[in-house]
Image (tube, rainbow, N blue to C red):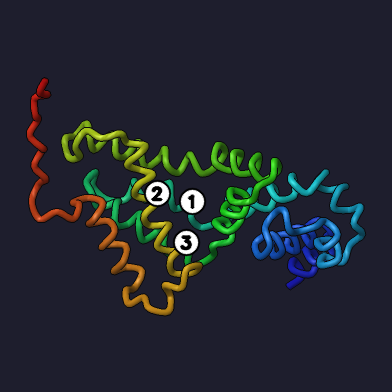
Amino acid sequence: MKRAKDEQKNPRNRIMRAATSLFARRGFAATTTREIARRARVNSALVFYYFGNKERLYYAVYEELWKTSSWYERRRNVYRNGAPDTAPIPRLALEVLSSLHEDDTIMRLGLFAGLEDSQGSRRLSERFFKTYISETYELLAAYIQERIREGEFRDIPPLIAARALIGVVAYQHIIHEFLGGKYVDEFSGKELSHILADIWLHGVLARPLKEPSSQKATA
């Protein structure tokens, strides 16, 4: 209780909490430092004193959320549990879905930065990817590369395969939360994660696709 009161007295912490709430609902461009200061009950000058400008504040919010999220630690362990086989794939799918269900603020901040048409947003989006997001793909790509060397996976570009898996799983959350899927969804997170992992691992064809026969060019 004392710690919570001490944090409440800290102007920087109040600014961070206010900024997180506003950025997650309105994005970078539509949120002003004046609104953040008003919500945090501080003088506007303190926002610039602690963070320099709005872009740095947005990044600080994203960085704090990323480093304190459960996914930040769990993503490193998901490939270490169990035998070196395909078991981590459904486990990873469930971890991504569970993390987004717990708190999708990081996704919201990333989407806002990527979709908004401003130089500041574009810089933030690029920095987010290079500093944090790419590492998640690289961890999975390293696992996929190892499975390729072991002969368990066919020879495919590991990084593209990693993006394909995480992308299809993350998009399920977008459908559920942002596009109305939650009103009709019938699967639990565990069921959905296993279905998505199975599709990624085995595809949807009942039998292998035949290669089209080559045709000689005619004069």
What SS does tag 1 mark? helix
Find residue 99 and name its label. Answer: 3
Q: Nearer the viewer, residue 75 or 56?
A: 56
Left or right, 15 with reference to 176: right
Look at label 2 and name its amino acid: Asn
Counting residues from the N terminus, which is met first, the one under dot 3 or under dot 2? 2
Find residue 82 and name its label. Answer: none
What SS does tag 3 mark? helix
Find residue 77 and name its label. Answer: 2
- Tell me if mark 1 has few (under 14), some (14-19) or many (20+) residues whose alpha carbon lies within 10 angstroms of its own: few
As drawn, 145 above or below 4:
above
Look at label 3 and name its amino acid: Ser
Left or right, 92 with reference to 131: left
Give the quarter of the image for residue 169. bottom left
Q: Residue at x 78, y 49 (%)?
A: 54
Give the quarter of the figure containing the N terminus: bottom right
Distance of label 2 from label 1 (alpha carbons): 7 Å
